[in-house]
Every structure is written in structure tokens, then in C-alpha cells.
């Protein structure tokens, strides 16, 4: 289920249905993803909204806790919108007690059987305490499952590079890179590195040996395993 920063709002009061955690494909054929966003496997988890069983034209709202924006970040959401009846996906921000709706243009309709990125520039909110909410609305038919995955905050101006357990994609990191670790990375084998931000995904493990280092210029988020050895 969902834990930590994000919470499903209350059905019947704030919305109609929940974002559900799933893997390997949603129950309906011809809609929803068959793999997660990152690393793109059938055993990885994602959150989705189910349109079958009378859940058409229903709202699901995922809301963050309060967060202080201490520097310029991009908020990035991996999203999947595939099916003949797909509805829409929205991102809102609470700032100064007022919800700002659709801070980026809403995504709607069938966008193909592929994962995409939606990016929200948070630089206007530096110094503010905000909340973010993600609203998914199913369409008017059962073929309208929407999925989201890999919600992340990246320092503005940094390009993302991902370690999948065997190589970097699209390339090796530098201080201008937002690094994601999605497999085993051991500095004794792969070497030290520098980055502007670091995200260790649930499938990721970072081992920093005594004689090596990892330099993180800005923030680090650990959703996996990090081991720092001091022999």
C-alpha cells in the first residue's frame, strides 16, 4: 500500500476511488500497463485507478504531506494512459491555503501503451510550504485505467541518469546529474561518482566502500538500501 509522503483521500467525501498498488498488468485487457515505469519489469509496482466494476467517470486523489521547497526542484511523475476510454490526469498545488488547479496542462485520452514523464517546475514555490495532489479521473468506459509511478523530485537544471544494475542510462553521472539507483551499485566494482541529487529506488542498493565515495550536491532520498562501509 501507500506509505510515507503520499495518501489516498477518503472515498465518498474527497473523491470516489483510490489509487491501487499493482504489478504485472491491470485486470482489464487493452488498458493499463503490463510493466512498471522503472526498471520496466512485470514484478515492479505502480499505482493505478481501476475503471471496471462501475468505477467509470470516478475521481481518485493522491495528496502529499506538507513540504518546504528549499530550492528549485522539478517534480516528475511517470504516467501511463492507455485505453479507448481513458479519462484525465491532473496535478494541483496548495500554496498559501489555496489550491492552484492544473499547474501544468492536464493529460487526457489514449496516449499509447507507453510510460511518459509529466514535469512540474517548483521554482516559483521556493521558500514556501506546499502540498501536491494528483487527480486521476476514469473515462466513460471500462478501458480507461491510468497508472503512475516513480514520483520524484529533481534539482532544477539536472538531467536524470539511471543505474539499472549493469550500466548507466543515458550516461555516466556528473555534478549536473540527478542519479537514480535501480539495481545493485557497489563502488568497489563500479567506482565513485558525483551527482546533484540521489534517489535510491526500492529495487536499488548502493554500497559505498571505505576507499570510495559518493558526492551528493543537493538532496538524497533512500527508498532502497544504502550501506556505507568503514573498515
Image (cartoon, rainbow, N blue to C red):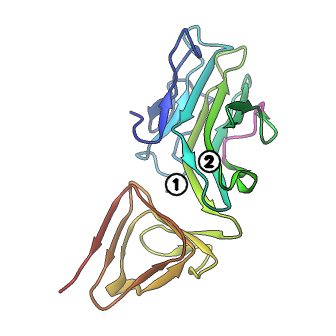
Disc number for residue 38: 1
Residue 111 within the segment the image draws in magenta: yes
Q: State the predominant SS element of the stretch in magenta.
A: loop
Q: Relative to 56, say whether 117 is above or below.
A: below
Q: Position of residue 90 (x, y in %)?
A: 72, 33
Q: Which residues are magenta?
A: 108-115
Q: Position of residue 109 (x, y in %)?
A: 78, 30
Q: Nearer the viewer, residue 67 or 61?
A: 67
Q: Which residue is mark 2?
A: 78
**The N terminus lies in quadrant:** top left
Relative placement, left or right, of 104 versus 36 is right
Q: Is residue 9 magenta?
A: no
Q: Please state which of the two labelled residues, at mark 1 or mark 2, is closer to the viewer.
A: 2
Count of labels in the image: 2
Which of the two discs, 1 and 2, labels the residue nearer the N terminus? 1
- Residue at 39% x, 62% y: name it: 204
User: Real-space Cα distance between discs 1 and 2?
Assistant: 9 Å
Please give the label number shown on residue 216.
none
In this view, which residue lies farthest toward the right?
Answer: 105
* Residue at the image position 30 percent from the left and 92 percent from the top: 211
Check the picture and name the quadrant holding the C terminus: bottom left
Front position in the image: 195 or 161: 195
Question: Answer yes or no: do the residues labelled 1 and 2 have beta carbons within 8 Å?
Answer: yes
Relative to 182, does residue 90 appear above or below in the rendering? above
- Examine the rendered structure and indicate whether residue 118 appears above or below residue 131: below
Few, some or many C-alpha atoms within 10 Å of disc 2 (few <14, some 14-19, many ≥20)? Answer: some
Could you say whether the residue bearing mark 1 is in a helix, strand or loop?
Answer: loop
What secondary structure is marked by label 2? Answer: strand
Side (left or right) of 223 relative to 77: left
Amino acid at each position: 500500500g501507500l506509505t510515507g509522503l503520499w495518501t489516498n483521500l477518503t472515498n465518498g467525501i474527497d473523491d470516489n476511488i483510490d489509487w491501487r498498488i499493482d504489478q504485472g498488468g491491470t485486470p482489464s485487457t487493452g488498458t493499463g500497463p503490463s510493466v512498471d515505469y522503472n526498471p520496466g519489469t512485470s514484478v515492479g509496482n505502480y499505482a493505478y485507478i481501476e475503471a471496471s466494476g462501475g468505477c467509470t467517470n470516478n475521481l481518485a486523489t493522491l495528496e502529499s504531506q506538507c513540504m518546504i521547497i528549499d530550492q528549485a526542484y522539478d517534480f516528475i511523475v511517470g504516467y501511463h494512459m492507455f485505453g479507448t476510454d481513458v479519462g484525465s490526469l491532473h496535478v494541483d498545488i496548495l500554496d498559501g491555503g489555496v489550491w492552484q488547479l492544473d499547474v501544468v496542462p492536464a493529460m487526457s485520452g489514449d496516449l499509447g501503451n507507453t510510460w511518459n514523464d509529466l514535469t512540474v517546475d517548483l521554482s516559483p514555490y521556493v521558500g514556501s510550504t506546499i502540498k501536491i495532489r494528483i487527480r486521476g479521473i476514469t473515462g466513460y468506459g471500462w478501458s480507461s485505467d491510468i497508472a503512475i509511478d516513480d514520483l520524484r523530485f529533481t534539482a532544477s537544471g539536472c538531467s536524470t541518469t539511471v543505474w539499472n544494475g549493469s550500466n548507466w542510462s543515458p550516461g555516466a553521472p556528473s555534478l549536473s546529474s540527478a542519479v537514480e539507483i535501480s539495481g545493485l551499485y557497489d563502488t568497489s566494482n563500479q567506482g565513485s561518482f558525483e551527482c546533484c541529487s540521489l534517489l535510491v529506488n526500492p529495487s536499488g542498493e548502493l554500497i559505498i566502500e571505505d576507499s570510495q565515495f559518493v558526492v551528493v550536491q543537493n538532496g538524497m532520498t533512500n527508498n532502497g538500501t544504502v550501506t556505507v562501509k568503514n573498515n
